[in-house]
Amino acid sequence: MLMRRKYLWGFFLFLFLFSFPLKTWGAEAVVDWQVILHDDRKVKEKIIVNEPTREIAEFFGIKNDLNQEKLVKERTAASFEEYAGLSRSFPLKVEIENRFLWDRYFIESNYKENETLDFLINESDIIKFSIKIPGVIKSTCDGIKQGDAVVWKITDQKKPVIGVEALVPNGFNIALIILGIGFMLAIFYLINSIVKVNRIIEEEYSLDNIESLSSDRNQKKQDEGMANIYSLSDINDENIFQSEDKGD
């Protein structure tokens, strides 16, 4: 009898524990926080929360039920300077050296009191923070490079030093240079063609050629005249010989 009661109490305890949503007793939320720099220098922020809690949903102003598996928040700023001025943005310090063909970016963490970061660290198990740059990543600090992005893992126990140095090409200026080079090559080809045509014209119709042609024509006329004289002389000689034959 006592064994039956013991098993019965165990059965009720099992039902009691698993009658609550699994999210309440399961693993905490995992946050994927992305900062993406585009070619036009606009900055996109994307926060993806897998298995979000009700508190996280309410923090972002989204009505959430415990069956929602993913929460996504996105926004775009015209530049890093504008992004830094947005509320609840990731605390970053960005320096940019502008060059004609590229821009050099120095990005580092600037941990300070940040409402969003502190809240997500407390409410989640881990934050995967990443910076994606459309250029050449020269160096990173404490991050894992994945293609054109660098990823850091942030927890309540550790805030890694975030640092990136990257070169981002200036596509507009590079396109201008390519167009300029193409235009110069086209002009060079055109000038070269004109020079060749002029050279041919000069060779064909130069004064020297005209004098040479005139001299050739005169010589030809003289030759023809001499040929006619010789021909007349032969005819006269022939007539003389014929008259002498008749006299005999």
Image: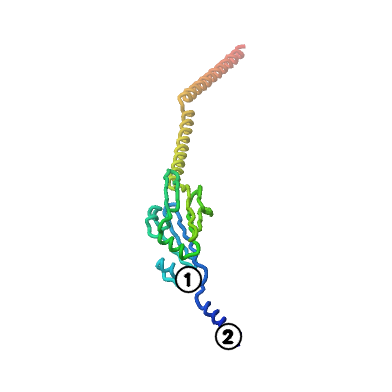
Coloring basis for residues: rainbow
Quick one: quadrant of the C terminus?
Answer: top right
Give the residue at mark 1. 68
Nearest to viewer (mark 2 / mark 1): 2
**Mark 2 — residue?**
5
- Label 2 sits on a secondary structure element that is helix
Q: Are marks 2 and 1 in contact (CB under 8 Å)?
A: no
Q: Amino acid at mark 1?
A: Gln
Quarter of the image with the N terminus is bottom right
Would you place residue 145 above or below residue 58 in this image? Answer: above
Q: Residue farthest to the bottom?
A: 1
**In percent of the image, x 43 and y 55: which residue is there?**
111
Q: Position of residue 83 (x, y in %)?
A: 39, 55
Residue toward you, 5 or 51: 5
Q: Earlier in the sequence, mark 2 or mark 1?
A: 2
Q: Position of residue 205 (x, y in %)?
A: 46, 28
